[in-house]
Image (cartoon, rainbow, N blue to C red):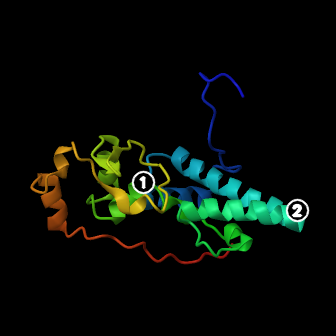
Amino acid sequence: MGDPKKQRRKYETPKFPWRVDILEAELKLLGEYGLRNKRELWTHKTTLSRFRGIARSLLGMPTQKRAVLEKQLISKLHRLGVLPKTAALDDVLDLSLEDILERRFQTLVFRKGLAKSLYQARQLISHGHIAIEGKRLSSPSHLVLSDEEPKIGYAPPSPIANPNHTIRKAIAAVGAAPVEKPEREDVQP
């Protein structure tokens, strides 16, 4: 288990970090989702890799044992809002990194129209102005559960909770209506 004082890495780095195509793809995702650094990207990539690894290992199991574990995996991904309830194991293998990044707290705050940009969403979360069900959360990379998503709003003790606050007026002036998830092109490897 290890010493509790020693933090362990929660991510795996790319095998070939200096390939131009990998660098360009990572930089595009960093800008598109407002990530602070590549470690945040690698953390979510490792999370996706673990889910897909579990799905691959389930494919080789006997049917009865597989059914129980498959149901648990799909229900967990359904709670995260990544897959529908009726998904199959093949849908887990088809998941992309963008599916995970869309469930980040920072991205959902921006998509709901609570901030002008992804970077402002990160700032508001870090300073404790955004809450889920009245509970402040200061981690922009938190993966929000699907039942928590409608409960995202301004924290009650925050001065931004006042509708006449200058930040809220600026957001309204920009016309920051809820932003829909952009259509992405399916890239064939």
Q: Which residue lies furthest to the left in this view?
A: 164
The percent position of residue 178, horizontal first and vertical second, equals: 30, 70
Q: Is residue 23 left or right of residue 117?
A: right
Q: Is 80 positioned to the left or the right of 17 in the image?
A: left
Residue 34 visible to an observer of this rendering: no
The single residue placed furthest to the right in the displayed view is: 62
Is 169 above or below relative to 140? below
| Disc 1 target residue | 105
User: To which quarter of the image does residue 108 belong?
Assistant: bottom left
- Image point (42%, 43%), residue name: 139
Q: Residue at x 88, y 64 (%)?
A: 60
What amino acid is at disc 1? Phe
**Label 1 CA crowd tier, 10 Å (few <14, some 14–19, many 20+):** many
Which quadrant is home to the C terminus? bottom right
Label 1 vs label 2, nearer the camera: 2
Pointers 1 and 2 in contact (C-beta within 8 Å): no
Residue behind mark 2: 61
As drawn, 6 above or below 43: above
At label 2, the amino acid type is: Met
Of residues 21 and 51, the one nearer the viewer is: 51
- SS for dot 2: loop
Residue 6 location in percent, x, y? 62, 24
